[in-house]
Amino acid sequence: MTRAPANLLAVRSLLLEHLNRDPNRSRDEDLEPNEVGIVGDANHRGGYHCGSDRVVTNDYSVVESPRDRNGLTLDAAALDVGTFRLNSGGRTHNLFTFSTWCVAQCVANAPDTRDIREIIYSPDGNVVRRWDRLGRRSTGDRSHLWHTHFSFFRDSIKANRDQRPLFRRYLTTIGLLNSEEGENDMTPEEHNWLRTVHRNLTVLDGRNPVGQTYTRMAMGEDHKDPDFRVSHPTLRSIGAQLTALQSTVESLMNRDFTDEQAIVTGVLAGLTPQEIAAAIPPTVAQQVVSELSRRLAA
């Protein structure tokens, strides 16, 4: 039977933790647990609130995107968020401002929105609108005057990709999370950028003071403030990897290679095909492909 996936349950917990925690607010102002739903009720058939056991023939939540067709499982792939009202940072925030903020992020194609297929919402409690990444629809029924619907591409649910970063950004923006809490999630692009920077600077380490300093800072061991420690878990993890990679580089540097090919072989032995591809400049990539094709055809 259709089930609630772990990554959407995590989003639900995050929203309830921060939008339903003020004892001075009334029940009408708090976001209540029964207002944040994932799985449709027993009679619900078709759509993103349903898993593979409840979809219907030509279900739009399956057939309109290969991301949905390839990601269909028993998991639901939608989240409903009900009404709330709170004051934070000198401003009033509610379901309508939350929804329009999320839609604006989707329109801007922010990296942490790219798993969202659609948002059905009201900007003011009077009209219903629909943002659809595929541009198929623009309307929704009147129940969305008092709740906002998020659909996620099913492949992102199947992959259990973390869907909290967008919602953490919202909570940080309105002042319910501090910046350190908000920084615990990074987009895939940010992770890839950091990975590339760390790899390149590690090659410099042992030969360039900048590389040495960067490695120590990544480990939280070097800063003008003696009490400074890098708190970001991703940086700590990559810092540990840097230390291991630095040892590998140093061991290669201390070996007595007699020819250039031996050096190349030694370096490549520690890299995956993906890392090798990522290190090839675009201007050289086509030449490499052509040369490999020539050799394979020989």
Image (spheres, rainbow, N blue to C red):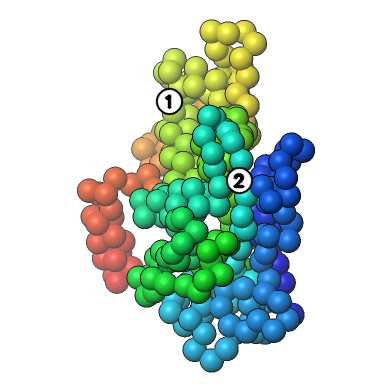
* Residue 95 in the image, given as x and y percentages of width and height: 55, 52
One can see residue 186 in this view: no
* Residue 50 in the image, given as x and y percentages of width and height: 63, 77
Residue 97 drawn above or below residue 137: above
Using the rendered view, name the quadrant where residue 19 is placed.
Answer: top right
Which residue sits at x=59%, y=68%? 77
Q: Is residue 90 left or right of residue 105?
A: right
For disc 2, the marked residue is: 85
* Residue 152 in the image, given as x and y percentages of width and height: 53, 65
Which is more toward the observer, 92 or 119? 92
Q: Is mark 1 on a helix, strand or loop?
A: helix
Residue at the farthest bottom position: 57
Circle 2 packing at 10 Å, graded few (<14), some (14-19), many (20+), is many
Q: Is residue 136 left or right of residue 19?
A: left
Which is more toward the observer, 272 or 81? 81
Q: Nearer the viewer, mark 2 or mark 1?
A: 2
Which residue sits at x=72%, y=54%? 32
* Residue 114 in the image, given as x and y percentages of width and height: 45, 57
| Sooner in the amino-acid sequence: mark 2 or mark 1 | 2
Which residue sits at x=65%, y=11%? 227
Q: Is mark 2 on a helix, strand or loop?
A: strand
Q: Is residue 42 left or right of residue 89?
A: right
Distance Cα–Cα, label 2 vs label 1: 52 Å
Which is more toward the observer, 21 or 90? 90
One can see residue 170 in this view: yes
Q: Quadrant of the C terminus?
A: bottom left
Q: Which amino acid does label 1 sit on?
A: Leu
Circle 1 packing at 10 Å, graded few (<14), some (14-19), many (20+), is some
Q: What residue type is labelled 2?
A: Arg
For disc 1, the marked residue is: 204
